Each structure stands twice: as C-alpha cells, then as structure tokens.
Image (cartoon, rainbow, N blue to C red):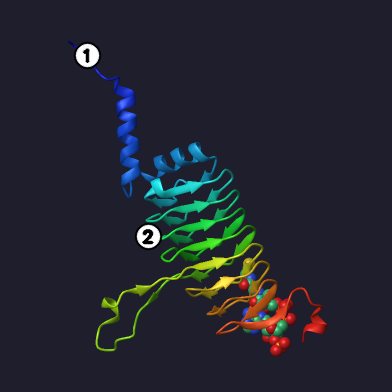
Amino acid sequence: MLTAPAPLLPLMLSRLRRKVAASERPLPSRLLNRWLASRSGAIIDPAADIRYPANLTLAPGVRLGRCRLICTGPVSLGERCEVRDDAIIDAQGGPVTLGRRVGVNPFCILYGAGGLTIGDDVLVAAHTVVIPSSHRFDRPDVPMWDQGTSQIGVRIGSDVWLGTHVVVLDGVTIGDGAVVGAGAVVTRDVEPRTVVGGVPARLLRRRDATRAGAR
Ligand SMILES: CC(C)(COP(=O)(O)OP(=O)(O)OC[C@H]1O[C@@H](n2cnc3c(N)ncnc32)[C@H](O)[C@@H]1OP(=O)(O)O)[C@@H](O)C(=O)NCCC(=O)NCCS
C-alpha cells in the first residue's frame, strides 16, 4: 500500500529544532537572536553571541546587548534582566539562574561551574567576576592543570549591589540587601543588609543601623 509522503515543511522544522537543540552555533547570530527574541519576548542585539541556545531560558523583557552567553549548562534569565555589551555568562557545564531585574554590566564574567544563583533586583557593576569553582593545588608535584577543580557554588540573594571590580569566590553566599564595595574579594559569606569591602572583604557597616551608631 502506498503512503502519502510526509509534508516537507514540518519535517524541515523538526530537523531545524533538533539542530538548534544540539549545536553550539546552530544558526548565524542575527537569525538565531531574532528567533530567540520572537519565542521569548526578549530584546536581543543582533550581535549577541549565544552558544548552545537550547540550554537558555529567557523571560519576557530580558535585554541582551552585545554580550556572550555560553550555555554549556542550563542558563535562565528572569524578567527584565539586562546583560550589557561585553559581559559574559559562561556556564562551564553548571546551572546559572538569575532572578528578575538583574543588571550585569560591561566586562563582567559570571561563571556557572558549581552553580550560580542570583535573586531579584541585583546590580552587578562593570568588571565584576563571580567564580563558583577553584583549581585544586594540594599536590606540588603534579601540575595544577592536572589536579582538576573543586566546585561548591555561589548564591547571591535579592536586592544586592556588587560594586565594580568585585571578585566573588566559590562557596560564598551573599545575603539579601548586601552591598559589596568596589574592588572587594569576597572569600566568606556576607550577612544580609551589610556593607562589606576590601581584600578579603570585611564588614564596613550594617545597613539597618544608623551610620553614626554603626561605627
Ligand atoms: C562600599 C561603598 C558602597 C561604601 O559607601 P559608604 O557607606 O558611603 O562608605 P564611606 O565612603 O562612608 O566609607 C566608610 C568606610 O568604608 C571604607 N570603604 C568605602 N568603600 C570601600 C571599598 N570599596 N573597599 C574598602 N573599604 C571601603 C572607607 O574607607 C571608610 O573607612 P573608614 O571608616 O575607616 O574611614 C562605596 O565606597 C563603594 O565601594 N561603592 C561602589 C561604587 C561602584 O562600584 N559603582 C559602580 C557603578 S554601579
């Protein structure tokens, strides 16, 4: 018995979807970004460099400048998140979850690796780097290159401001309402509603105390 040939268009579309799901760069950026924007309601610069887009979830109102998103793990950007020109989100195989209205400024790098979670209403100033992993270096007789990495993960709460040139190291939790001063290296957990700064970051004051009383 003869069967009717499969309609060509649905077949081509399902092939295209499979290709998009699997590959690093399934389509030229301009085309891919337009397709992602139409599916999600995001506003995406035609030159944004999005790799492995099948792992990317964009909420409506997200704005992506000429940034780079390397989605080797699941990357999720909540409503009205903004990732500006020259910022990078590099999942490194781990999950990266940004809540609503997270602003990631130019030249920031947010790595995934052991997992990165950021709450709502967070400001990340330019040149800040969050690194949820670390090279192992226990053995001086083995090149560090060969010792692998440890990965714990980083959690950043809601209503947090990370100043410019901040570095957040693996295993750190930053509480809701915290401010991290410019140039800080955050090696330990930061309490909610505190202002920290320096290398390593230490308490400068509490936001919920009067300034005079806090010193
Ligand atoms: C941390 C910060 C918010 C503190 O502001 P503030 O509460 O007004 O602090 P003050 O200027 O009154 O300084 C309070 C103390 O903290 C110290 N301090 C301020 N900023 C610091 C920083 N980034 N690192 C280390 N110490 C800092 C001051 O030297 C001062 O110390 P002292 O009491 O021993 O003299 C601010 O200094 C900062 O770093 N802002 C980030 C700016 C930025 O990155 N903008 C990017 C655009 S989004």
Residue 122: quadrant of the picture: bottom right
* Residue 104: x %, y % from top left: 55, 60
- Determine the residue positioned at 62% across, 81% down: 197
Determine if residue 27 is in view.
no
Q: Which residue is mark 2?
A: 93
Amino acid tagged 1: Thr
Is 38 in front, or is 5?
5
* Residues under numbered marks 1 and 2 in contact, where contact means CB atoms less than 8 Å apart: no
Figure check: 45 above or below 94: above
x then y, percent, for residue 176:
66, 66
Between the residue at mark 1 and the residue at mark 2, the CA separation in whole angstroms equals: 44 Å
Check disc 1 and report the residue beneath it: 3
Q: Secondary structure at mark 2?
A: loop
Residue at 49% in and 75% down? 169
Q: Does label 1 point to a residue whose CB lies under 8 Å from ligand 1?
A: no
- Tell me which image quadrant ligand 1 sits in: bottom right
* Quarter of the figure with the C terminus: bottom right
Q: Is residue 159 above or below residue 55?
A: below
User: Callout 2 environment at 10 Å: few (<14), some (14 to 19), or many (20+)?
Assistant: some
